[in-house]
Image: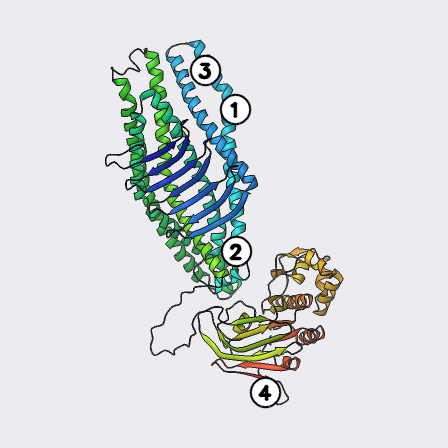
Amino acid sequence: MLLDEDRSILPVMLLDEDRSILLVMLLDKDRSILLVMLLDEDRSILLVMLLDEDRSILPVMLLDKDRSILPVMLLDKDRSLLPVSWIRTGLFYQSTGYLVLIAAMLVARTYCDVWMIQNGTMIESAIIGRSNTDFKNYLFNFCKVMPLIALVNNFLKLGLNELKLRFRVRLTKHLYDEYLKGYTYYKMGNLDNRIANADQLLTQDVERFCNSVVDLYSNLSKPLLDIGLYIFKLTSAIGAQGPASMMTYLLVSGLFLTRLRRPIGKMTVTEQRYEGEYRYVNSRLITNSEEIAFYNGNMREKQTIHSTFKKLVDHLHKFIFFRFSMGFVDSLIAKYIATVVGYLVVSRPFLNLADPRHMNSSQPELLEDYYQSGRMLLRMSQALGRIVLAGREMTRLSGFTMRITELMKVLKELNSGKYERTMVSHQDKESEAVERVPLVPGSGQIINVDHVIKFEHTPLSTPNGDILIKDLTFEVRSGTNVLVCGPNGCGKSSLFRVLGELWPLFGGRLTKPERGKLFYVPQRPYMTLGTLRDQVIYPDTYEEQKRKGISDQVLKEYLDNVQLGHILDREGTWDTVQDWMDVLSGGEKQRMAMARLFYHKPQFAILDECTSAVSVDVEDFIYSHCRTVGISLFTVSHRKSLWKHHEYYLHMDGRGNYDFKPITEETIEFGS
């Protein structure tokens, strides 16, 4: 153990009887653990923990006897466990090999460094001693070892790069499994506003997080190995006081620098948030380019992009200046002052004429010992310096860790039915009060029964609790078509979102078929990336189509039913890949969506203005065909021509009232 002037333990190492390191701990002045490494009998790392300045564990890795990672965990500041991935013994089956490769190459590289110091010192000694034979021998030895050293360095890079990639693959798959579970991707953007830029978190931030974790593993393992080896070598050369003094200085300076780096984590989080906002406003311009062009809104969009970019630039200026200031202090303390301390330490046994180790040494021997001791002390100082400066990357990693763990927390809560949405409160007392219900998602009951949709005393509410209809009660059985009408904002789309389980049920009872037996056709249909066949069978795959026993000839009949057979004739094959959002017109996309409906043949279909761009005669045939194949319809439309295809109407007035009545000859038709 080494103690500083106030008797605080700095590094702690536990050794067994054959002097093998079993435990390594670094403690700061208040005896709080900064780093813990647990090693087994053959010096293989079993546990690595790294703690930041407020004692929060950042990464934890636990390895079993065959070096397989068991869990990889991240803990937040209140010690809540946020698992990145729980993996069986042998997790990362290939990655385990790369971990072993990295560990082996780090050990090999350390021994190569020691050999280079010793051989380089002998070459210089031969030059100064004018020994041509020794010079050639040591130079030839260096030439022989060069390929091996190059191989070690590049194997190390290979292992690190592969480990980064495999870590990213595992974490990305885990996050997307949670993100695309159920309707979490919809809820994150529409019901919950804690995560603003999920796309950036799932792509850029995951990559940077994985790279930082692997780099931290490398940047800590190699210096720790160097320190242990150089302490052993230097103790026999210049005594234990020299390396102890150097380590004490560097550890104290490291703790001081760690305190100064505290703002980096928060600044990294802010930087990534501004980067996400900047990319978002650019993506909006691309997505809505046609609408913006019609409005001549380019100057307004330019203003928005520039203001968003300015926020990012202003923050980056502050971040750059902070890093400049920290870089100056880092260089001064961890590099230059450390060099002065190194000279004082290594020169002491040589300047002490009474030192027994050098009383009988010749000038060349003194020179060799000095160069070897000096370079080893320098390498040990550099190793400790890398650990100290790794704090800079650790604080940056903590920023990415906060963002990734926040994403994982939100995904977990959304999958369990919990969401949060910050609403702007209106303080105007004269404004009309909006009736709200308590936000208790899941307080209603959903029962899955085929061939019936039944609302029983169900409040129709928005996710933030605004009541659209206080008590909705009606029943529709298969074979009955219902026309839903009313002014904009009355709750038509809200009704369908509740039916589709996109919005939570806040009370009452909803009886309906399971989600796969309901099909929603929007006004602007979605065309997926892929072939012409994929547009008809979406979201099924070709393999699922074959399992259902539906041939391409049947798909052709679906296209003919909606008068799109000419598209197959034009493209020539079902496997043609196009950007179908651009290739198909608005009316063709709506008819393609109806062909998709015929393919899936659900019990109930929700048609939301889905034939507004289709001619009346084609629309009439489509609705008649739906009745023929047994698809019951909930239709939102303003066309009076569609009333004849429905038996009931549901009219909402936008003030919380509704009528559910049969359509008779006396019924007044709404629409045009």
Mark 3 element type: helix
Which residue is tagged 1?
A: 147
Q: CA distance from mark 4 to mark 3?
A: 104 Å
Within-10-Å neighbours for mark 3: few <14, some 14–19, many 20+: some
Instruction: Looking at the image, tell me whether mark 1 or mark 4 is earlier in sequence order.
Output: 1
Image side of residue 315 versus residue 616, left or right: left
Which residue is tagged 2?
A: 178
Instruction: Looking at the image, tell me whether mark 4 or mark 3 is earlier in sequence order.
Output: 3
Residue 583, placed above or below residue 248: below
**Residue 138 numbered tag:** 3
Q: Amino acid at mark 3?
A: Tyr
| Coordinates of residue 632 in the picture (x, y in percent) | 65, 75
Mark 1 or 4: in front is: 1
Q: CA distance from mark 1 to mark 4?
A: 91 Å
Mark 1 or 2: in front is: 2
Image side of residue 214 versus residue 589, left or right: left
Mark 2 or 4: in front is: 2
Instruction: Looking at the image, tell me whether mark 2 or mark 3 is earlier in sequence order.
Output: 3
Instruction: Looking at the image, tell me whether mark 3 or mark 1 is earlier in sequence order.
Output: 3
Mark 4 element type: loop
Q: Amino acid at mark 2?
A: Glu
| Coordinates of residue 562 in the picture (x, y in percent) | 69, 69
Q: Amino acid at mark 4?
A: Ile
Residue 170 visible from this viewpoint: yes
Mark 2 or 3: in front is: 2
Residue 29, placed above or below residue 445: above
CB atoms of marks 1 and 2 within 8 Å = no
Quarter of the figure that contains the N terminus: top left
Mark 1 element type: helix
| Coordinates of residue 384 in the picture (x, y in percent) | 35, 33
Q: CA distance from mark 2 to mark 3?
A: 59 Å
